[in-house]
Amino acid sequence: MYIFTFTLFALFAYNDVFIKNKILFRLFGVLAVTWLIFHDGFRWGIGTDWDNYYNYFENIYNDNHEKLEIGYEVLTNIVRSFSENYSVFLVIHAVIVYSLISKTVFRFSINPFLSFLFLYSMMLTYLGMSRQYIAFAIIMYSYKYIIDKKFIFFILCISIAYLFHRSALLFIFAYFVNRQWSQKFILISLITVAIISISGIINLLPLNVFYLLNDDIGTKMTSYGDSNLIQANIFFTILSLLKRTFWIIIVLFFRSKIKNEKGYFDFIFNLYFISTLIYIVFNNTILQVIVARGLLYYNIAEIFLIPYILSLVKMDFLKKVAFLMLLIYGYLTINKAFEFYKKDLGVDIFRPYNSVLINSNYNAMNGHSK
């Protein structure tokens, strides 16, 4: 399923970048969104937190059920009011998510299907994070209100997203980054955060300060600090820095050649740049686990930035070589994420892909994957 979907989106992206058939473009648009809804809505037993969300749906009417954000609880109650089938909930969840995301992708990407390809590559392992995925989709939809300078509607989107996942509040700063930053500012910022990261100063923070935010956060941070899983490492920090700054370096050299139609590029680049700064500062620190969740709202700008980078390549042959390299990059991104969860949890929670439409008798009896 994963290889098929990746290949399908690669073909859609190839038409978008090279062939540019308008009839196929419209057809592929419908197919892409429909397939993503099918892919996510009919999965069964795969993804992070599957058991937790499945049990939450099953026990929503129990007095002692787990309390989650009010938005997610309301959505679950609405679905449960007319169906006890968890797959119905997943399909509705997928329809909401990809309706919002697709509107943003088709408006802001110069090659929407290339963006969809990298959306799939980056977000595949977020399948089980149901609450944040809805918040993420709403946040992406709010891009339009930043560009159109409609602050009230932007805040409304943030507020609704917050009802599904509290990390959505971290995106409120994005409203003020829709401008062009000078190369001098970008370089000074990169050097500053690199020094902070390599120094390891973040790991010197007293862990007790996190109890001021929340007892649960304080406990988790103490646990991370007591373990030896997170340690500053200069070598890996530098490697991470180089990886994260690759697109930024290209932009710094060739920015004048990038068409900034409707002012979208500056906004997209700044989102990715902010995510890079935050990533570098907190990489290999006791805060990286918590920061990673909030970073998602900014880091996703990469799916819009990559098509701009590819547009810099004018020769057809070189552009096809670059396209192939991007496909490899996307595929490796998926496998790296899969292997991370496999190593971290000791079990592969994504492979093989399992659907409620296959082996449905087993699924119905067990309520989880094999």
Image (cartoon, grey):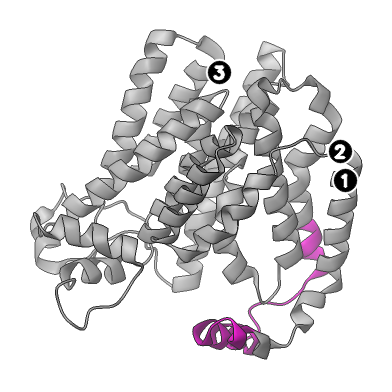
* Closer to us: 136 or 18: 136
Mark 2 crowd level (few <14, some 14–19, many ≥20, 10 Å Cα): few
Residue carrying label 1? 185
Point out which mark residue 60 bears: none
Question: For the residue marked with disc 1, what is the amino acid?
Answer: Phe
**Numbered disc in front, either 2 or 3:** 2
Point out which mark residue 17 bears: 3
The residue lying at 30 percent from left, 71 percent from top is 52
Q: CA–CA distance between discs 2 and 3?
A: 30 Å
Q: Does the magenta stretch include residue 183?
A: no
**Numbered disc in front, either 1 or 3:** 1
Q: In which quarter of the image is residue 221?
A: bottom right
Task: Say whether residue 281 is left or right of residue 154.
Answer: right
Task: Say whether residue 217 is left or right of residue 43.
Answer: right
Q: Is mark 1 on a helix, strand or loop?
A: helix
Magenta segment, principal secondary structure?
A: helix
For the magenta stretch, what is the residue range? 210-239
Question: For the residue marked with disc 3, what is the amino acid?
Answer: Val
- Say if mark 1 contacts mark 2, CB within 8 Å: yes
Q: CA–CA distance between discs 1 and 2?
A: 5 Å
Residue carrying label 2? 182
Report x, y in % for residue 19.
51, 10
Q: In which quarter of the image is the C terminus?
A: bottom left
